[in-house]
Image (spheres, rainbow, N blue to C red):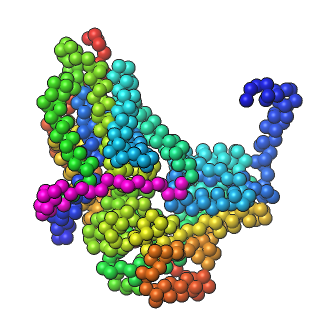
Amino acid sequence: MTLRNLHVTRRNVLALGAAGAMLPLVGLQPARAAGAIKTAAIYTVPVEQQWVSRIHKAATAAQARGDIEYVFSEKVSNTDYERVMREYCEAGNQLIVGEAFAVEDAARSVAKDYPDRAFLIGSSFKPDAAANPNFAVFDNYIQDASYLTGIIAGAMTKSGKIGMVGGYPIPEVNRLMNAFMAGVKETRPDATFLVAFIGSWFDPPKAKETALAQIDAGADLLYAERFGVSDAAKEKGVLAVGNVIDTQADYPETVVASAIWHFEPTLDAAIANIKAGTFKADDYGVYSFMKNGGCSLAPLGTFDAKVPAEIKAKVAEKEAAIKSGGFTVTIDDNEPKSS
Amino acid sequence: MEAIEILFTASLWAAAIRIASPLIFGTLGELICERAGVLNLGIEGIMTAGAFSGWLAVYMGADLWFGVAVAAIVGATLGLLHGVLVVPLGLSQHVTGIGVTLLATSLCYYFYRLAFPEVTSPPKIDPFQPWPVPVLSEIPVLGPALFQQTPLTYLAFVMVVLVAWFLERTPLGLAVRTVGENPAAAEAQGINVTWVRIGAVMAGSALMGIGGSFITLSAFNSFFFDMMNGRGWICIALVVFGAWRPGKALLGAVLFGAFDAYQLRLQQLAGAVVPYQFFLMLPFVLSILALIFMSRRVAYPRALMVPYRKGER
């Protein structure tokens, strides 16, 4: 494009200036919108990471529907997180989606400075409506689905020894592990667990080594919280249970069942509230519950014929009870221990 | 009691060797650089670049060994950058090295995103498979531990011998050692200090690149952000542990691998009593203790981190 066909006339320059002057006004609008909501997501890890990939998927879908205008930054370090949040606020985004696990104070202070925006933030803590009326929290409360995978795992293990490899023992990891363990106890009351944490979110070779050590110690079924665990299981011919995402396509003979997180209900609830002008400091964690469609048991796929029929019946029965509210999976955020 | 029994299992030592393999390459690479008088803190980034480029080459259809070669070439190129900045230009080796690490890791992420803008889980390749050495792999305990590894692990052991032989028994190795001890004397011998140092940094960085590629082509089958996870920094410590000698560096790497493999197994046993962080810390604490013990009478290359300026008195 040359300068000539840009038509740099005085009128154009003036119009541009006026448009520029209008820009801050866009930001002043309350958290209520008729068309697509300008949404910015800030992730501390790449969008390949299991947890974040679910948020990214839901946001991409909402954008395709025309509900939001979606932009995101990935792999933002915690030390840089507040700056990026503020930049997106300054850019006029009405909904900020993110994760404040390591930057609670900073994230909440940004929310305070932009009271007319909606913040939907992953957090291990509860919302504080008095201090931050626009700061809602969510997390992957998919203990219902984890519990169901546990029931299947308990039926599939022969040795009764189950290996579990986690990144760090933080609430969102612990509660899924505990729910899984409770599920296992349903079908295999004498099961024992080998629990290990590798102190990193991204070190698949180390997760794999840890899993191999558990197989050495007699585990014949692994709970794959991290990438790398299913690879060890595949290599040694033992089984694995997935978490947050479904990886059975990559490990058809290894991954028995997976507990899947669906972020869509959480995001859709936030969008609906913003459109209605009723967005407030709610705990969106409940939208990850099974009864709200926030999590599910992945199709058993290649293992459909291998899981005994009475176990499948038991899972279906529990699933119905969870959905109807007749049965509630306990939320236990304590660090799981080897037994 | 069980904790002691673990020490005599073949699987522990097989894991130790697996964990040690990338460290052996990285440590040898750093050792060559430092013997020539150049500290290379670019190692973490160079290993990441090796892991990424080797994996990408294989993903795009290249042979596994071609991927290893790509990793070596990318490593050598980054080594050239570091060498030019610190040898003829004489910049701070610490600052330049950290700069190379930041540049290399960030470039990897940049190219990764360019190549894979829309993936939900990282693409996989078919990595090196264990290749049991005939006859030797049949030996009880020792066989499964040492001789049922992937080809890259065998290459690591071969490199230890090669590097030791090169440094101690060849004229060029003598030149490398001389520029690291007394560059003025090397100059008087007609050795071009600048070129020998740059060459050593490039060769060392090529080894670091191969070490990185072990992570994506042998230990695992896909590339992740941050997956190097400080392995490069461990190599820096292992060079000191090994007193700048390839044989001892190998010992250090295997020892570290053994500590790590051991703590992974201990965590399963006593996880209910002792916090897991203690076990994660264990290999590092034991390495520091070993370092104190090993490096008491150590002689480091005299001209390490001293830039050489021709004609300066």
Residue B306 picture location, percent across and down: 29, 23
Q: Residue at position x 70%, y 45% from top?
A: A91
* Horizontal arrangement in the rendering, residue A277 relative to residue B57 (left or right): right
**In the image: residue A147, left or right of residue A110:** left
**Residue at position x 14%, y 36% in the image:** B297
Q: Quadrant of residue A272?
A: bottom right
**Vertical comparison of B152 with A248: above or below:** above
- Whether residue A57 appears in this view of the structure is yes
Residue at (35% x, 19% y) in the render: B88
**Residue B44 in sight here:** no
- What range of the chain is rendered magenta? B119-144
Q: Is residue B115 magenta?
A: no
Of residues A22 and A225, the one nearer the viewer is: A225
Task: State the quadrant of the C terminus of chain B.
Answer: top left
- Determine whether A61 is above or below A15 in the image: below
Which residue corresponds to the image point at 43% horizontal and 55% vertical from the top-left? Answer: B124
Identify the image quadrant of the N terminus of chain B: bottom left
Task: Report x, y in % for residue B268.
Answer: 30, 68
Identify the main secondary structure in magenta.
Answer: loop
